[in-house]
Structures are given as C-alpha cells and as structure tokens.
Image: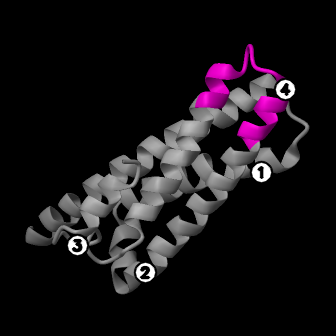
Amino acid sequence: MASYTGVLLSASNQPFWSDTRLLGGLFLASAAATGTALMLLLRLPSAAPSSLVRLAWVNAWALGLELVLLVGFFVSLGGLAAPLLQSPYGKLLLVVTGLLGLVIPLVLHLARGWGKWTTALLCLLVLIGGFEMRYSLLMVAQHLVVAGRS
C-alpha cells in the first residue's frame, strides 16, 4: 500500500512519472520515514527511551534510503531532470523535501545529543518533507504539460 501511488504513477504515460521506475521505492521509503516520524512524535511524551532510540534508528535508515532514491530519481530522468529542477515544483522538491525533510533530519540524527524538542522538530520536518514530495511529484507533470502548451 505504501508504494502503490508511486507504482501507479510510473505505469501512467505522463512525463516524469513514466520515465523512471524509482517512484514506487521512493514512495515506500518516504512512507517508512514519515510513518516512523509520526510514531516518534506521538510516543515522545510517554514512551520508554529504548523504544524511542529504536524508532529513531529506523527513521534514520528510512531517511537515508529516501535520500538515495530521490537522488536516483533525478539521475534516472536524464535530460528531463533539468526542466523538473527549473519548475517551481522541482525547486520545492529540492529545498523542502531534500534539504528540510531529509538532509537536516539526517544531520540531527547523527548529532545524537538532542532532546525531546529537537526530536519533535526533526519529526515535523520529516512529515512536511514527505507531504511536499508527494505534492510536487503529483503536480509537476501537469505543470510542465500545461507550460509546454503555452
């Protein structure tokens, strides 16, 4: 279920969606990252520290996998990566998902000297980045098709 949207988009004939086979994996890794971030956020006030550490470990691995798949997604697009990155949705994808939703939370995971407020910030950034990734990937194909007609 987690990767179904990405697989369904890949099976369409829309530009960007049908030009890569990594959307299913990207959506799956994003679902794992956002799911564990939400569990961390909800369990933060009352969970045992050992369970929070395990959830944070899974979240860090899911974020790393999502980052690798996002880079692979751009590489797999080849010549279509430039129009994507020049569109407003591509810029949002890089800044919000890439930087705020993946890189900064991974750096915070590596710091390890953080408390509940830092964990909450990390989780919120991951959730915002995951939502934005889905939004941008859904909107970019329509945006570029409309822009190509005018």
Is the residue 109 above or below the residue 22 in the image? above
Q: Earlier in the sequence, mark 3 or mark 1?
A: 3
> What numbered label is drawn on residue 107?
1
Q: Taking 92 as reference, is 44 left or right?
A: right
Is the residue 95 above or below the residue 72 in the image? above
Distance of label 3 from label 4 (alpha carbons) = 46 Å
Helix, strand or loop at mark 3: loop
Helix, strand or loop at mark 1: helix
Is the residue 61 above or below the residue 55 in the image? below
Is the residue 91 above or below the residue 19 in the image? above
Q: In the rendered image, which residue does mark 3 sit on?
A: 15
Distance of label 3 from label 1 (alpha carbons) = 33 Å
Q: Coloring scheme of the render?
A: one colour
Marks 4, 2: nearer the viewer: 4
Residue type indicated by callout 1: Val
Q: In the rendered image, which residue does mark 2 sit on?
A: 76
Q: Which residues are magenta?
A: 39-56
